[in-house]
Image (spheres, helix red, strand yellow):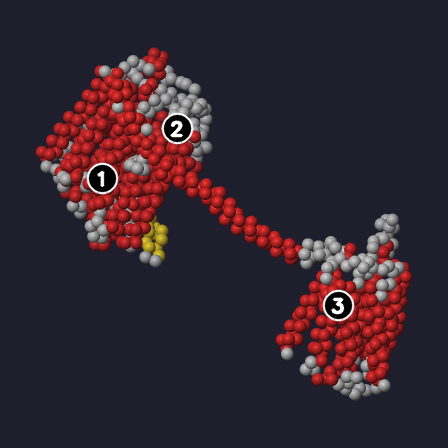
């Protein structure tokens, strides 16, 4: 399998994640779609690392995983806080910045 | 052999992704994501990135997803209403996604980067091993390594601050 | 010191006086302000005399000096300086202006004593004198225009001096607007002069004019006609004269100074100064002469039926300036200037005496209510009679010699001008009649109540203050006349000023007795030596004949007045009834105000209304609100994007990214 396949797959996964963010309204699911996009990026990184022949892309992918983990933590904390205040879990309710 | 594995894993990843965005119940979405992550780990293995694959399974699917499962169980999963307040969103979003994919695919397939058409150079047996990654992390990428540990600390503190019970505010 | 140095000092003192009084009005006590004002003009007069002496020290043909302080503009062929021009003509005007002004300041020192705006009065008066001197001493057309405009402003400020009186402010505005019309004429003339001759400076203009223009070429005629517009507006000649009678709303010293002796003579000075141009455009000069003649007669008829004392004297001013304008247009330059000088003396005197009488009448100006002041106010009556004698050209008085010199010159020129001479004598008859009409109405006879009060108790009559024209009640605070009325008999500054002028009015003519001495002609000779017209001299016999005719007419006029107003008082009423339409025409000022209202004021108002209703509302507002509406609509559409939905923004984000990627893909292929 040439590297191309992996990159094309990665872009397909990325687009799927993007569609998910635009369509879904629950913050939970939006976070999940965000994970999808991050993982697609990881796949691309590892594929390029294989293509170049050194391990730097893989290290990058590990760091990305770390960042994703942190972001998940904070995001879930937000969701828990919103739930605790008995507010509906709907991204459309954040409308204060309207013109 | 390799191709078959690749296509299976690819299908798994795609199926998981589609499942994530399509399911009504968030819990099912989480499950689909876990499946997706496993497929991705297989793909990493195919790319001789053993350590990353292991980290993917252990850290991502193992720890992060467990976190997700806990929160979904706590919060509960409600469905979303069918009515879309933003006009045109339901129609435009898939369109844009497809457009994005096509553009990226075109960019990659017609790229002048000739190495994309190969399987990569022959690598030594220790490529992608934990030892190799570890050496890179501690020698060449020490600073990013330390920075990400600080980031993790911040995230932990932030999470506690966000989710801590506040006795006065709580009803 | 040189003549020009003295001339700069002449300009400096009134300006200093005005500024000092204006800045220090809170600190200066009343008497000090008046003293500073009078002293400033007095010093100016002294410097004028010194300049004259210095000038006379020069050789006859070199008696003209230009001096400039700095350059205003020096670019692209334009060269305007702050420059003055000292020659016998300007010095003559300086002496007349400062001399008479000093006396009028002295008069005001006493007359305006109880007015709350005393300091403002003297400041404005000094500023006026400065502006007039600037006008007279200017060495180029630009500075002339500056002085011209300043004088217009000073006139406006002083006419509306009692600013809380609506009639006064309206009169001030009327004067200013008509003066602006004149200013436009002057400025356009200056533009044309610059375009044709390339300079504003007097010396250069007068030198080049005969070379550039042929006689009666339409350009030079246009220039002179525009200059005449300015001159007529300032000197209140037909048809731009309607502001002068209304200008009597100002205090009496103002009427004496500005509207009798100095400002209204600016037009005459202008024509005399630009005589080289007028001699190249005989058509324009004839227009001026005919206008002067017409004004002379028309104003004379109006003065005959006026019942307001100050307005009657104002029309007399208009008429006498008609003589002067006629004089300088036909070439009798020194005669015209001589009449300017004598007129300044006796007209200022008449106004001063009138002021005294009006004060005795508690600010009532209607001569129908005045009589018997001859007994009540001796000094005032004597000076009034002196002024009237000079005005009527009684033999031996100053007015006698000056008026007849103009008419003799007209006769000597012959042709059309001889006809002007005849009409001029007719005007002289009118003058004598109306001036002694005033004398015989006010002075002899049974004292009116106010005069009676003065004789019996010695108190000046005191009534509730009211507007003399409309009868509206007023108070005596700032913006209205003061509470006390000052008559000459009680006030030494007034007496001093009037006495000096009375003497001058009577003997001032002795400097220019035909065949005996020609002081003024000789003095002004260097200015007019290049003029062809100025050298026309009537023969001695013609002159003495003219004098005799003049004397006869004057005595005839006085006799007629005596007949109508003293011997047979009822006859004037009978004549009025019999010639009722004529009387109405004269009393309504020949309907000039109504004519101007129809021709100018109403169309202007209509244009204004059209501009407001149609243009402003439809076009301007439409444009503005139209633009506003369009912008608001467009921004409303754009505002729709800011929905507040995060997912919507995300969509836009991805859309933008997709577009950008597409662009780069296409660009690289």
The CA span between labels 3 and 1 is 97 Å
Residue C663 lies, with reference to residue C361, above or below; the image says: below
Q: Using the image, tell me which numbered label, if any, was put on residue C289.
A: 1
**Parent chain of label 1:** C
Question: Residue at 44% of width from left, 33% of height from top?
Answer: C25
Q: Are marks 3 and 1 on the same chain?
A: no
SS class, disc 1: helix
Residue B98 lies, with reference to residue C443, above or below; the image says: below
**Parent chain of label 2:** C
Question: Residue at 48% of width from left, 45% of height from top?
Answer: C614
Question: Residue at 43% of width from left, 42% of height from top?
Answer: C607
**Parent chain of label 3:** B
Q: Is residue B152 left or right of residue C553?
A: right
Is the residue marked by circle 2 packed among few (<14), some (14-19), or many (20+) residues within 10 Å?
some
Residue picked out by circle 3: B94
SS class, disc 2: helix
């Amino acid at each position: 399998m040439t590297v191309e396949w992996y990159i094309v797959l990665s872009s397909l996964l990325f687009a799927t994640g993007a569609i998910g963010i635009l369509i879904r309204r629950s913050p939970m699911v939006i976070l999940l779609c965000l994970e999808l996009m991050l993982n697609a990026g990881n796949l691309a990184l590892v594929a390029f690392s294989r293509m170049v022949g050194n391990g730097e892309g893989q290290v990058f992918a590990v760091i990305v995983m770390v960042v994703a983990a942190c972001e998940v933590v904070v995001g879930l904390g937000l969701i828990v806080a919103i739930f605790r205040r008995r507010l509906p879990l709907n991204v459309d309710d954040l409308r204060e910045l309207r013109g | 052999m390799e191709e078959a594995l690749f296509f299976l894993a690819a299908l798994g990843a795609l199926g998981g992704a589609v499942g994530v965005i399509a399911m009504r119940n968030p819990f099912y979405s989480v499950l689909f994501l876990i499946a997706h992550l496993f497929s991705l780990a297989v793909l990493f293995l195919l790319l001789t990135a053993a350590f990353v694959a292991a980290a993917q399974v252990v850290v991502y699917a193992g720890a992060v997803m467990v976190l997700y499962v806990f929160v979904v169980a706590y919060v509960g999963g409600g469905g979303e209403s069918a009515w879309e307040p933003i006009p045109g969103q339901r129609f435009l979003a898939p369109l844009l996604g497809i457009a994005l994919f096509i553009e990226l695919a075109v960019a990659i397939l017609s790229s002048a980067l000739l190495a994309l058409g190969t399987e990569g150079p022959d690598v030594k047996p220790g490529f992608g091993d934990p030892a190799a990654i570890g050496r890179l992390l501690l020698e060449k990428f020490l600073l990013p390594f330390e920075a990400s540990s600080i980031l993790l600390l911040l995230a932990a503190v932030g999470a506690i601050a966000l989710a801590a019970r506040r006795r006065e505010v709580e009803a | 010191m040189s003549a020009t140095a003295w001339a700069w000092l002449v300009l400096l003192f009134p300006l200093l006086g005005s500024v000092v009084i204006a800045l220090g009005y809170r600190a200066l006590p009343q008497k000090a302000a008046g003293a500073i004002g009078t002293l400033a003009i007095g010093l100016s007069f002294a410097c004028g005399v010194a300049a004259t002496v210095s000038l006379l020290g020069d050789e006859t043909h070199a008696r003209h000096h230009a001096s400039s302080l700095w350059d205003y503009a020096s670019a692209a062929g334009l060269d305007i300086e702050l420059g003055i021009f000292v020659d016998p003509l300007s010095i003559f005007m300086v002496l007349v202006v400062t001399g008479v002004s000093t006396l009028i300041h002295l008069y005001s020192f006493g007359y305006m004593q109880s007015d709350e705006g005393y300091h403002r009065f003297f400041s404005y008066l000094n500023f006026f004198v400065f502006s007039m001197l600037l006008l007279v001493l200017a060495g180029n057309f630009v500075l002339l225009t500056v002085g011209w405009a300043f004088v217009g402003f000073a006139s406006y400020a002083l006419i509306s001096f009692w600013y809380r009186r609506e009639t006064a402010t309206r009169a001030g505005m009327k004067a200013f607007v008509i003066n602006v019309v004149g200013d436009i004429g002057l400025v356009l003339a200056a533009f044309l002069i610059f375009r044709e001759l390339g300079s504003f400076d007097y010396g250069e203009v007068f030198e080049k004019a005969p070379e550039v223009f042929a006689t009666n070429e339409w350009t030079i005629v246009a220039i002179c006609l525009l200059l005449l517009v300015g001159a007529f507006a300032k000197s209140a000649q037909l048809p731009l004269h309607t502001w002068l009678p209304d200008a009597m709303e100002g205090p009496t010293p103002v009427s004496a100074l500005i509207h009798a002796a100095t400002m209204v003579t600016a037009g005459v000075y202008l024509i005399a100064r630009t005589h080289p141009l007028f001699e190249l455009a005989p058509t324009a000069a004839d227009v001026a002469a005919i206008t002067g003649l017409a004004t002379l007669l028309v104003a004379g008829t109006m003065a005959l039926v006026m019942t307001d004392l100050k307005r009657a004297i104002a029309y007399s001013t208009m008429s006498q300036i008609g003589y002067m304008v006629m004089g300088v247009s036909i070439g009798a330059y020194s005669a015209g200037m001589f009449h300017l000088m004598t007129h300044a003396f006796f007209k200022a005197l008449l106004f001063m005496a009138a002021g005294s009488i009006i004060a005795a009448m508690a600010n009532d100006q209607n001569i129908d209510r005045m009589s018997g002041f001859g007994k009540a106010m001796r000094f005032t009556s004597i000076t009034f009679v002196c002024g009237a004698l000079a005005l009527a050209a009684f033999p031996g008085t100053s007015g006698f010699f000056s008026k007849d010199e103009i008419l003799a010159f007209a006769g000597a020129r012959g042709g059309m001008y001889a006809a002007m001479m005849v009409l001029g004598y007719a005007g002289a008859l009118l003058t004598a009649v109306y001036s002694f009409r005033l004398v015989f109405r006010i002075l002899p006879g049974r004292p009116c109540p106010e005069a009676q009060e003065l004789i019996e108790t010695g108190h000046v009559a005191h009534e509730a203050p009211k507007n003399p024209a409309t009868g509206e009640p007023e108070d005596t605070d700032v913006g209205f006349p003061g509470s006390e009325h000052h008559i000459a008999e009680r006030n030494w500054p007034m007496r001093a000023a009037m006495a000096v002028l009375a003497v001058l009015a009577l003997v001032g003519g002795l400097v220019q007795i035909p065949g005996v001495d020609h002081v003024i002609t000789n003095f002004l000779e260097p200015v007019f030596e290049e003029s062809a017209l100025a050298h026309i001299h009537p023969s001695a016999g013609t002159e003495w004949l003219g004098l005799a005719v003049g004397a006869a007419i004057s005595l005839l006029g006085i006799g007629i007045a005596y007949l109508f107003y003293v011997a047979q008082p009822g006859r004037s009423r009978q004549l009025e009834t019999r010639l009722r339409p004529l009387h109405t025409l004269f009393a309504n000022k020949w309907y000039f105000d109504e004519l101007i209202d129809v021709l100018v004021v109403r169309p202007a108002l209509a244009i204004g209304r059209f501009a407001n209703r149609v243009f402003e509302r439809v076009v301007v507002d439409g444009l503005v609100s139209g633009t506003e509406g369009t912008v608001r609509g467009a921004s409303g559409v754009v505002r729709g994007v800011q929905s507040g939905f995060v997912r919507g923004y995300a969509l836009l984000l991805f859309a933008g990214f997709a577009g950008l990627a597409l662009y780069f893909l296409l660009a690289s292929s």
